[in-house]
Amino acid sequence: MSDISRAIDALLEARLRQLPAVERESARWKALGERLGELDTALTDLRTHTTLDLELAAALTNHQLPQIRTDVANTADTFRVIAARFTRPTVNLGVSGAARMGKSTLLQSISGLDDQQIPTGAGIPVTAVRSRILHSLTVRRAELEMHSPESFLTEVIAPLHIALALSAQPRSLQEFATWSYPESADETVDRLLLTRLLDLQSALASYEHLLTGGVRSVPLEEIRPYVAYPTNEEINAAGPHGVRRAYAAVREARIQCPFPHDHVDRIGIVDLPGLSEVAADADQRHMDGLRNEVDAVLVVKRSSDTSTFFDKNDAAGMALLDEVRGYVRSTGEFAYIVHNIDPDKPHLADNLRGDLLRNLNGGEADRFFTVFETDVRDPHRVGREVLTPLLKRLADGLPVMDAEVLAGTRGRAATVRDRIRLQLTDIRRVLDQVARRAGVPEEVNDAKADQLRSGIAIRLRLLVAELAAEANGSTDPGFAQAIANAYQGVLEWIDDGFGRGADTWKQLALTRMITEGHPADFAGPEFNRIRVEISRRFAALDDFFTERLVDAWDRTAAAVTAECGALFPEPSDGEKAPGRAVLSRLAELFDASPQPCPDLAAAVHNLLNVRLEYRTLLYPRVRPDLAPLNLQVTHPETGEEMQNVAVPLTEAGAEELYGIFNGLAEQAAFRIQKSLLREAAVPAAVVHALVEQFEDTLIRSGTSVQEFRRFVRSYRSDLWPEEFRGIDEANSRFARVVRVSKEITAIVEQKAEPKIEPGSERESKLESERGGEEL
C-alpha cells in the first residue's frame, strides 16, 4: 500500500470516529424541529381558547417562529449531510465541465471504461444521468436507480413545465402522453427546453416500461443508452416509433469496475452532467449532487479553436462551486481545473493557459485554483499529472476541510440557537402576562387541595382505627381456620405413607436398608423430603395473607374514592373496581401529573408493593419445630449429637422405622400448629402497620401539602368538573406551552433541566413566579 493510500485510509477512519457526535447533533436538531412544531400548535390552541382576551391572544402570535423552524430544519439537514459525508467509505471526486470540454474522456481515462459505458461525442451534450463510478478489483457491474412514474413526473417533467411557465402539470403518464404543448415556433417560449420536453413526450413508449422504481442491474456493455443522450446518427436513423430515450427513466447510475491507476482503492468518481447542459433546474441538481456526494471537484476546460479563454459560462460554473463548498474556506481546496491540452496544437494551450493565469488566478500560478494540465485522452498522463498530485493534496487538505465544514455548521447552529433563545424569552414574557390576568386564583386552588387532603386524612384515620381494633382483638377466625386446614392436610399426607402409601414406603425403606447395610441412606433423604413438604403445605397460609392484603387495599381505596371518586368512574358493568386497580390508577395519576407528585406516588407504590407471605412472615418462627425431622439431632439433655433412628434391617425394622417417622412428623405438625396459633395477631398487626404507614406518608410527609396542591392543579376539572372544566382546559393548553418551551430550552442548552428538590425554597419561589405553570 502506498503512502497516499494509507493517508486516505486514515482520513476515512478519522471521519468515522467523528460520526457519533455528528449523528447526535443531527438527531438533536431534528428533535428541536419537532418540538418547535409542537410549540407552534400549542400557541395556536392557547390563542384560540375562549377564556383568553383578544389582546393576550394577539401577543401570543409569534411571527418569527416559521422562519426559525425553517432554519432549524436546514441545520438538521446540514448535520445529516455531514453524517453522510463521514459515513462514505470512499473519497469522492466530482468531474464536471461544459459540453465538449473532454469531461467524459477524462472519466474514461480515470476509470478504464470506454464509449460503451461513458460515451463521448462532439457538438451535442452527451451525459444525461449522474453516475457514480467506484473502483473494484472483483466486480464489473452497473446498478441503475430507476424513476417511478411519480418521481419522473415530479423531478423531470414538473421542472420543465415550471421553467416554461406552463400553468399546469400532468399528474399521470397518460396525461403526459396526450398533453398539448405550445408550438416550437412560438417566440415567447424557450425553444431548447420545449424541444427537450417534446422529445421526452414523443419517446415515452420507449422508456415507460422502465419507470418501475427500485434498482436495475445492467451489464456494463449495455449501459450506454441508460446514461447518455442519443447520438445524431441514432436520431437520424429513428424509425416511426421515434428515438429510444431509456436515460429518461434513470435517476442515477452506480458503476463498479477496476481503475487502471495507483492509490485508488478508496476513491469514487461522480460523473456530473455538464454545467452548460440545457435542462430545467440543472444548476440546482448539479449543486445538490456536489453537496451530498463529492469531496473535491475537477472542472475540465479544453483548449480548442472555440475555447481559448475562461468565458461567462465557466465563471458561472465556478460561482456555483463557490456556493457548493459551503463552509470550506478556500474554493481552491475544493475545486480544481483540469486544462485539457491538445499536444498537436500547443498555441491553443498557451492561449488558454494565459487566460487561466490572468482571469482565474490573478496573474500568479495556482494562486486561487490549482490547474492540472494533461491530455485527458492519455490514461498514463492523467494518472501522473492529475490523480497523483490531487490525491496528495486531498490526503493533507481533506481533514482541514472536514474541520471547517463542521466548525462552520456549528457556528451557524449557534446563531440559530441564539434566535431561539430570544423567541423563548418573548414567549415566557407573554405567558407571565397570561398567568397574571386569567385563570384560577392560587388561594382557591390551595383551599381545594387542603379540603381534599383533609377529607382523605379523616377517612384513612378511621380506617386505621378499625384495623388497630382488629389487631388488638381475639384470634382471627379466618387465620385459625387456615391453620387448621393446613394442619389437617399435613396429617392426611402423613397417613398416606408420606404421599407414597404406607406399604410402598415400608418396602422402599427395607430395600434401601438391606442394599446399603444401614437405615441412614434411606432415612436421611426421607427426613429432608418430609421436612420440606410439611413446610410447603403450611405455606398454603399465603392464600389467607393475600385475602387480608386485598381486603386492606379495598378498604384503603374506598377511603380515597369517597373523596375523589370523580377520578375513578364506575365500570360500565356496575361491578366495583378492585382496590388494587383503583390504587394503581391513583399512583398513575400522581406519576403522570404535569406538576410532579413523587412522594404521593411513592406512598401508593409502597403500599401496593407489599407482600405478606408465610415464608417471610412466620416461617422463621416455626423453623425450630422442624428440627427433630433430621437424621442427626442434638440430645436435649447432654447436648451430644446422636442418630435419630437405629432399627434392624428386617421387615419389622422397616415397620418400626415407619412408626418413628410417623410420630416425628405428626409431632412436628402439631408443634407448628401451636406456634402459628400463638402468632394469630401478627397478620392483623402487619396490615394495620402498613395502612398506618401509608396514611402517615400520604398525609404528613414534608411535601404532602405542596404535592396535594400540585395534584389539584393538574386534575381540578376531573375532581370538580362543574366548577373548573372550562378554566382547566385553558390551563391545560397553557401548561402544554410551558412544557414544550422547557423541552426546547433543554435541547438548545444541550443539558437536562436542573433538578429542583421537592419542597425546596427555590421550588416554592419558582411556583409562585410561574403560577404553578397554569393560568
Image (tube, helix red, strand yellow):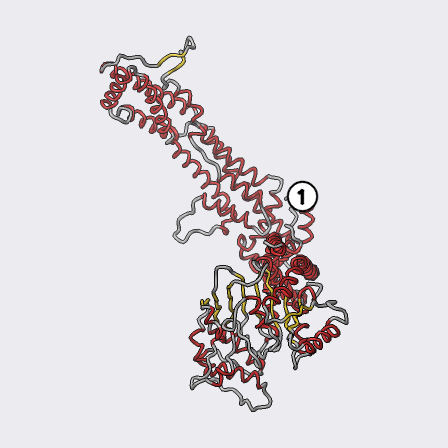
Q: Residues within 10 Å of mark 1 (few under 14, many from 20)?
A: few
Hey, which quadrant is residue 741 in on the image?
A: bottom right
Q: Residue furthest front?
A: 344
Amino acid marked by disc 1: Ser
Task: Decide if residue 110 is on the left or right side of residue 489.
Answer: right
Task: Decide if residue 515 is on the left or right side of residue 392.
Answer: left
Q: Is residue 400 above or below residue 171?
A: above
Give 257 or 74, whichever is nearer the viewer.
257
Task: Decide if residue 628 is on the left or right side of residue 228.
Answer: left
Task: Decide if residue 637 is on the left or right side of residue 563.
Answer: left
Q: Residue at x 49, y 33 (%)?
A: 688
Hey, which quadrant is residue 536 in on the image?
A: top left
Query: Dividing the image into 4 quarters, which one contains the C terminus?
Result: bottom right
The percent coordinates of residue 738 (x first, y second) are 63, 57
The percent coordinates of residue 742 (x first, y second) are 64, 55
Secondary structure at numbered mark 1? loop
The percent coordinates of residue 277 (x first, y second) are 59, 78
